[in-house]
Image (spheres, rainbow, N blue to C red):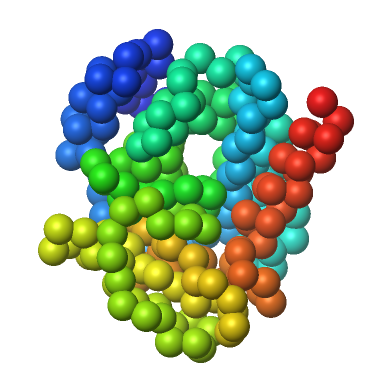
Amino acid sequence: MKYGKIHPWDLSPKDAIAVQETLRREVVLSFEDRPVARIAGIDVGFDGESVFAAVAVLGFPGLDLEEYAISMLPATFPYVPGLLSFREVPVVLDSLETLEKLPDLLLCDGQGIAHPRRLGIASHLGLLTGIPSIGVAKTRLVGTHSPVPDARGAWVPLMDRGEVIGAVLRTRCGVKPIYVSPGHKMDLEHAISFTMAATTRYRLPETTRWAHRLASRKLKSS
């Protein structure tokens, strides 16, 4: 797979912020109505000085595991909130390169445009791969919202500086909502729809659950 818009990874935090400010202008917040048969969950973890990524590819809409890949690389960028994609994306790209067939959609355990500079890992990864992407986060990074009704599929807008940057989505009654935002080549309506379609009886979508399970296995065996 050939990636577009590649930039250096050995950057200072200041230069990384400049890259985000440039790339954010290229994010596309619309979804072309194309067939989606394979969706991938992405989870990234850390083991000492190394960073590893698990990519779980599920058939859609059946949600059966079809393929997976796990990669590990040395951590080359410091832990800086708001710049985690510079630490995580290289190893995710490495995992994607080992797949026999690329997915049609990426669901990242992290943010899309629900980010101070509108370029979380889902947006960053979507831009580099050209694959439509969604940020599905367990916690909020930025923004405010009203209470979410306690009904499956209920959501309220996540707002920041007068802009809708995502949705606070209730995937299961009686549990905390999740934070969904478009990454790249994605709009909010489709981001919510795909996330709900990938979610069964648990809080998190099956894509995230599979990727986390694979990442946990890798961590235990390291």
Rendered location of residue 144, percent (x, y): 28, 65
Quarter of the figure that contains the C terminus: top right
Give above or below for 164 relative to 10: below
The one nearer the camera, 62 or 179, is 179
The one nearer the camera, 164 or 131, is 164
Relative to 105, is 7 on the left or the right?
Answer: left
Quarter of image, res 192: bottom left
Residue 73 appears anywhere in the view: yes
Residue 126 appears anywhere in the view: no
Q: Residue at the spot x=26%, y=31% of the render?
A: 20
Rendered location of residue 79, percent (x, y): 47, 27
Relative to 163, is 134 on the left or the right?
Answer: right
The one nearer the camera, 187 or 37, is 187
Q: Residue at the spot x=41%, y=57% of the render?
A: 140
Quarter of image, res 193: bottom left
Q: Residue at the spot x=77%, y=33% of the render?
A: 219
Q: Residue at the spot x=39%, y=36% of the render?
A: 81
Rendered location of residue 61, percent (x, y): 62, 68
Residue at the farthest left position: 162
